[in-house]
Structures are given as structure tokens and as C-alpha cells.
Image (cartoon, grey):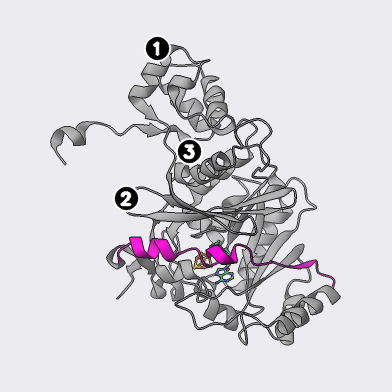
Amino acid sequence: MTDIEQSVPAKINLLGLPQAKLETFFEKMGEKRFRAAQVLKWIHQMGVISFDEMTNISKPLREKLKEVAVIEAPEVIQQWDSKDGTRKFLIRVSGENAVETVFIPDDERGTLCVSSQVGCSLDCSFCATGKQGFNRDLTAAEIIGQVWQAAKSFNQFEEGAPRRITNVVMMGMGEPLLNFDNVVDSMNLMMHDMAYGLSKRRVTLSTSGVVPALDKLGEHTDACLAISLHAPNNALRNELVPINKKYPIEVLLASAKNYIDNLPDNRRKMTIEYTLIDHVNDRVEHAQELAVLLKDIPVKINLIPFNPFNLSNYKRVSNNALRRFQQVLIDAGYITTVRTTRGDDIDAACGQLAGQVQDRTSRSRRYKIDQQQLESSADLIPVKLVAVSE
Ligand code: SAH
Ligand code: SF4
């Protein structure tokens, strides 16, 4: 890079700024705060990212904006449509990387599964994303950009579009609570009246249990919460979800309950996600233990049959074991659903979002969490990363 290039300040990307940050941006430019509302609506309600098309903004201001800012959505490299209506996007984020985003239609509902990081450092034993390691956090623009691109692909920005995104789940690649600020900013945009206007009951953050971040989540959002539990006791969960060694089940559930209890509408339940793996965590005894563990917590349980992938020896739960497991929980009084696998023909299922990124991110730039940090008393944030070995 030359000295001249280095001295040119990068233009700010307005795509990922929630209202408060956009207002500060305009104030710093010496402009009125209400410009933020105008720009938000152009970008997220009308799908317009060219300043020239923003007709309620004067030409001189548009020129001034072009000098200091851009509105750039990450590019869709490829799109696959499943015969069941599921649509998967491979989205380029800066550098060599790409992440995956999945749209799952279901009657009136359209759920978008959004990624928060390139890879994941937490190394859960049954997850393809975890197996590839972590490369970097996504920016808020790259996170909300997935929503923007999906909305655009369904012509959602036009009047009377047949398909809409009605729900967002932060269940794509990455651990959202390890990219806290950018995830909070983008969820804020998903739920903001002048952006996508989704109800707080239709935006869900899923976490494997980064407790210090979960403890402060309620100060920043009132979205729904899903906890990736996958085991009814610490011995088993330590094997499946390594972060459990740092924040064991009782600590995690206490933090999650605290989040739910402090929501303004106190009738909401959190979701417990439980990926069922053949002969690992699918026994009747596990279901019984789970029923006891959760008895004082407002939960609904979502069972996810394990989705196999290349680097894993685990097998999908059998249908019999799945039915037995579900029945124990139903009999104990829990609302218990089974997540049906969608987008089978395009590898769009939970935990399978990885393949393309793996090919694109060289091993030398992939990291995972340092095991010693998990087992020591040191704080987890910031996460200490070690290179993924060959
Ligand atoms: N990092 C977050 C969100 C992304 S994972 C978390 O762990 O919650 C989204 C969900 O998919 C989690 O519940 C995760 O446990 C589940 N999952 C991961 N790999 C899977 C697989 N191979 N089969 C089924 N579910 C899987
Ligand atoms: Fe990361 Fe979630 Fe996969 Fe665990 S399940 S490795 S936390 S993405």
C-alpha cells in the first residue's frame, strides 16, 4: 500500500448503522438528525443503496454523502433453490471469505437463518462450522446485508411481494454472542420500525452459552433467546459443547432465566435446542434428566435430529429414539417440537453451513478457542485463539 492510499480515510458504510449511530453520523456532518430516518427507510424499506436515488435528500447533500460514505451490501456469489422452497445464499464478505444464509418458507412464515461470524471458534463436536475454525467476526453491515440481499431476492422491497422474511434466527455460522456489538446493532435494525420492523417475538438469538455476554444482553435487546443445550448434564455437555467447561449448565441456565425474567413482556419462553445424535445423547434417561433439569424454567424444547457432514462420525438419531425422547418431554408437560430438516438437496440444514467457506479460507488463517483458557479461571472475553493445526 502506498503512503497516499494509507492517508485516505476509508468511507463509512451506512448499511450497518442503527438509527442512533446514523443520527450521530449526520450530526457530525453538521446535518439534521432526521436525515437518519430518511436514509434508514431508503435502505431497509425500499432497498435503495444509491445516494442518487434518494430523492428527498438535496443534491448537494447527496454529493457530500458520497464523499464520506458508501452503502454497500455484501455480494451474493451463488444462490441455490431447494425443491421444498428453501433458498440458500453464498455471500461474499470482504477478503477471500464467504458465509451462508438460508431462507426457509413455511406457510405464511419465512424464516431467515443468518450468520454472525466467518466460521466459529467454539469447536462443538457435532457442528460443521465449528470444525472449520474461526476466521473473523462479520461487521454489522455484513450481518444486516444478508437480510437485505435475501429481501431483495424475493422482491420484498416492492409492493405486494409474494414472499417475505417474517422471522430471523441468528443460527447460521458463528457464535453471535462472541460478536456482540455487531449482532446487537443488526438485530436492532431487523426490529426497527424504519427498517425491517420485525416483532421482537420473531427475532431469535441462539447461543451455546457465552455467559458474560448473555448477562448483559438484556441491556441491549429484547429479542427471543435460544440456548443450545444438547445434553442434560455437565459431563456429557463438556464433550459436545466445550464452552461448557467454562460456563457449566447451571450457570448458563441461571443467566438465560435472568434474561427471560427481565423482558418487558414476562410471559415469553426461551427455546432449548437439543441436537439428537444416535447413541450419544438420545436415551430415554437423557430425556428424563432433561425434564428434571428444566422444571423451573419457562422453556419450549426444540429437538434437532443431527445433520451429518463429512468430517463427523456421528449419526442421525433413529426415528424411534426421536419419538421416545419427544414423548418423555411431552408427558412431563413441555412443549416439544422437532425441527424438520429442510433444504436437504442443497445442504442447507442446521450445522451444515460450512463447505464453501472451508475451501476459501486457508488453514493458516483459521483459529479455534484455546482449550487451556476454557479450563482455567481466566475470563473468556476476549477469547484467546490458537491456529487450527494441519
Ligand atoms: N453458535 C450458535 C448459533 C449457531 S448454531 C449456537 O450454537 O447456538 C445453530 C444451531 O444448530 C445450534 O443449536 C447448533 O447446536 C445446531 N447444530 C450445529 N450443528 C448441527 C448439526 N450437525 N446437526 C444439527 N444441528 C446442529
Ligand atoms: Fe459454534 Fe454454534 Fe457450531 Fe458450536 S454449534 S461450533 S457455538 S456455531
Residue 150 vs residue 200, the one in the foreground: 150
Q: Is residue 123 left or right of residue 283?
A: left
| Amino acid identity at mark 3 | Gly
As measured in the structure, the alpha-carbon distance from the residue carrying label 2 to the one carrying label 3 is 18 Å
Residue in the image at 71% along x and 81% along y: 319
Type of amino acid at the residue the image marks with label 2: Gly
Q: Which residues are drawn in magenta?
A: 333-362
SS at badge 2? loop
The answer to whether residue 320 is magenta is no
Give the x, y percent position of residue 148: 53, 40
Residue behind label 2 places its C-beta within 8 angstroms of ligand 2: no
Q: From where the camera sits, is residue 198 visible?
A: yes
Q: Which mark is residue 160?
A: none
- Image location of residue 268, percent across then percent down: 76, 54
Q: Quadrant of residue 86?
A: bottom right
Q: Which residue is mark 1?
A: 60
Q: Amino acid at mark 1?
A: Pro
**Place of residue 75 in the rendered image (x, y in percent of width and height, measured from the top left):** 42, 44
Q: Which mark is residue 95?
A: 2
Kindly report the distance in space between the C-alpha atoms of the residues bearing marks 1 and 3: 24 Å
Residues marked 1 and 3 touching at CB (< 8 Å): no
Q: Earlier in the sequence, mark 2 or mark 3?
A: 3
Point 49% across, 32% down: residue:
21
Residue 16's mark? 3
Is-magenta flag for residue 350? yes
- Give the quarter of the image for residue 323: bottom right
Q: Which badge, 2 or 1, is on the more N-terminal residue?
A: 1
